[in-house]
Image (cartoon, helix red, strand yellow):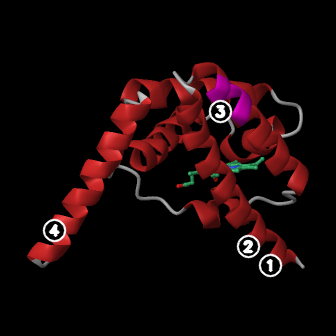
């Protein structure tokens, strides 16, 4: 790695940390977001069963993975090294309605838990962008 690359990585990390601090986001909040959101997902009549089929009772690993995922996005940590797209391509029969419900529950959860609207939008905007990418890929492959 060149010095310039290292510097730009450090600058990027510093700006993620500054943004998180300004929005009041920390690890404890990410953890609470993931726990609260997936507790709702599990109870949901439409998307709960998709998770039940994929995960059975093995929620601990999923929650830990999703905390790493959101911590990477919001705090710039490097613990997540999965590949979200193939995980969703494997799920049979996902429709727009599944994504709509997922995002609706996520919106509700961030609006309740985040300390300010900007922090809620930060998470929601990223989730909806990722959701759009998943759907574009899934529906392109299935058409
Ligand atoms: C809309 C935005 C969404 C985001 C940001 C998101 C994010 C993620 C991430 C990061 C993982 C972990 C992937 C890995 O590294 O293994 C995951 C797994 C999973 N997601 Fe999503 N997801 C979204 C939508 C959905 C929807 C709509 C469903 C179904 C209703 C869904 C069902 C699942 C399931 C069942 C797994 C576990 C897959 C497995 O371990 O076999 N996701 N998701």
Circles 1 and 3: CB atoms closer than 8 Å = no
Residue 46: which numbered mark, if any? none
Residue 137: which numbered mark, if any? 2
Q: Quadrant of the N terminus?
A: bottom left
Circles 1 and 4: CB atoms closer than 8 Å = no
Between disc 4 and disc 2, the foreground one is: 4
Residue at 15% x, 66% y is: 7
Graded by Cα atoms within 10 Å as few (under 14), some (14 to 19) or many (20 or more), the crowding at tag 1 reads few
Instruction: Find residue 53 and report its horizontal and vertical position in percent.
Output: 76, 44
Between disc 1 and disc 4, the foreground one is: 4
Which residue, given by chain and number where applicable, does mark 1 sit on? 141
Which residue, given by chain and number where applicable, does mark 3 sit on? 57
Callout 4 secondary element = helix
**Nearest to N terminus: mark 3 or mark 2:** 3
Position of 129 with respect to 119 (left or right) is right
Height in image: 85 above or below 126?
below
Instruction: Find residue 73 and report its horizontal and vertical position in percent.
Output: 45, 49
Circles 2 and 1: CB atoms closer than 8 Å = yes
> Looking at the rendering, which quadrant does residue 89 occupy?
bottom right
Callout 3 secondary element = loop
Which residue, given by chain and number where applicable, does mark 4 sit on? 6
Spatial distance from mark 3 to mark 2, Cα to Cα?
Answer: 28 Å
Instruction: Write down the region rendered in magenta.
Output: 107-111
């Amino acid at each position: 790695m060149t010095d310039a690359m290292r510097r730009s990585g450090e600058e990027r990390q510093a700006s993620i940390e500054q943004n998180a601090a300004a929005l009041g986001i920390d690890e404890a909040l990410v953890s609470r977001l993931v726990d609260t959101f997936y507790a709702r997902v599990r109870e949901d009549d439409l998307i709960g069963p998709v998770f039940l089929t994929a995960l059975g009772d093995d929620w601990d690993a999923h929650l830990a993975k999703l905390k790493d995922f959101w911590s990477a996005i919001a705090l710039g940590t490097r613990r997540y090294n999965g590949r979200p797209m193939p995980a969703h391509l494997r799920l049979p029969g996902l429709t727009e309605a599944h994504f709509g419900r997922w995002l609706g529950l996520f919106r509700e959860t961030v609006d309740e838990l985040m300390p300010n609207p900007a922090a809620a939008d930060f998470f929601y905007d990223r989730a909806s962008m990722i959701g759009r990418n998943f759907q574009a890929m899934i529906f392109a492959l299935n058409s």
